[in-house]
Image (spheres, rainbow, N blue to C red):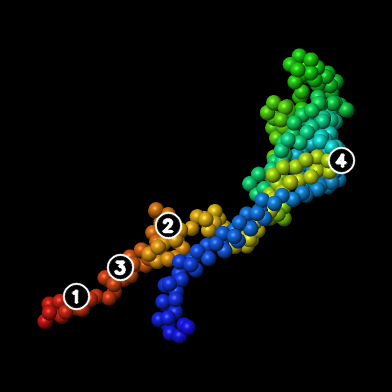
Amino acid sequence: MIKTRQDINQFINQHSDQLAQQVMQRSQRWYEKLEDAAEQEFLIPATERQINEALQKFVVKNVNAIMDLSLELHDGWLRLYATVNIKGIFAKLAVNLSLVHVQLDRHRQRFVFSQLSDTDVIALYTDSYLKTKGVDIALWWFHKVIKKDPLGLILGKINLTRQKEDILYLDIGRWLKKNKKIMDTLRKVQVNHGFLAEQQLVLKANANIADALNIGTGKQVITDADNPANAKIDDSETVLTKTPKPDAPTTDQTTVDTHSDNDLTKHPTQETRARTSTEEG
């Protein structure tokens, strides 16, 4: 039976290794549970109406050359409708696209599309006859001569997307950065991909556990260094330690240096005081 402080110290010394191992094992299990939760994928459905409302709010209102923008969502593909105004040329365009990739997190907000069809010019109006003929000739040149579609050029001209071959990159972060509610959500949840279904877009997301636990702290509390698998046991002291950065002095070193300076300048030793008294005498 433990009765005295000495008995307590002896008990701790005898069982310290076992206690440290138990702490590490429990911490490892807890950390693995967090990792499992972060890896679990869940689906976020967005309806066609919700997406079109978001396009009006975040894209149409912020890009002057776009008069209207909407999507028709189908199983595995979508049809994009856009009405643009480029220097007095009003055109309503339509094109079929497939969704290649979605990335929505605190660092990047991007949709990637692949073009499935040539661009259809549904309606075309200009402020002069010459511009109308010029557009007709340009479309004929693209389709018949160089065998390319002008969609990427048109959307790039109005700074909506950028194109690489038949792939269109739409970065929407420039319109979302000022929306605190959305950015706070993207710190807790990140979308890694998505797929199209009839009249809806389904996003595949993961919970960002570390950021969710760090809300309001102003710094990252849980990092990879907190994984108990990366911790070490010091056999001499039987404590869990982390290796300090080479350039950063440890707390003990800083304390010793500070105290040594104070001792020399403000607290002279007995030998110094004796020598001073002898010189004065």
Give the residue at mark 1.
272
The kind of residue on which mark 3 rests is Asp
Label 1, label 2: how many angstroms apart (C-alpha)? Answer: 38 Å
Mark sitting on residue 244: 2
Q: Position of residue 219 (x, y in %)?
A: 56, 59
Q: Quadrant of residue 181?
A: bottom right
Q: Which is more toward the observer, 247 or 140? A: 247
Please say if the residues under marks 4 and 2 sit with CB atoms less than 8 Å apart.
no
Label 4 element class: loop
The kind of residue on which mark 2 rests is Pro
Mark sitting on residue 198: 4
Please say if the residues under marks 3 and 1 sit with CB atoms less than 8 Å apart.
no
The kind of residue on which mark 4 rests is Glu
At 63% across and 46% down in the image, what residue appears? 107
In the rendered image, which quarter contains the C terminus?
bottom left
* Mark 2 crowd level (few <14, some 14–19, many ≥20, 10 Å Cα): few
The kind of residue on which mark 1 rests is Thr
Q: Which is more toward the observer, 23 or 40? A: 23
Label 1 element class: helix
Total number of numbered labels? 4
* Mark with earlier residue (1, 4): 4
Q: Is residue 198 above or below residue 153?
A: below
* Mark with earlier residue (3, 1): 3
Label 2, label 3: how many angstroms apart (C-alpha)? Answer: 24 Å
Q: Position of residue 242 (x, y in %)?
A: 45, 59
* Mark with earlier residue (3, 4): 4
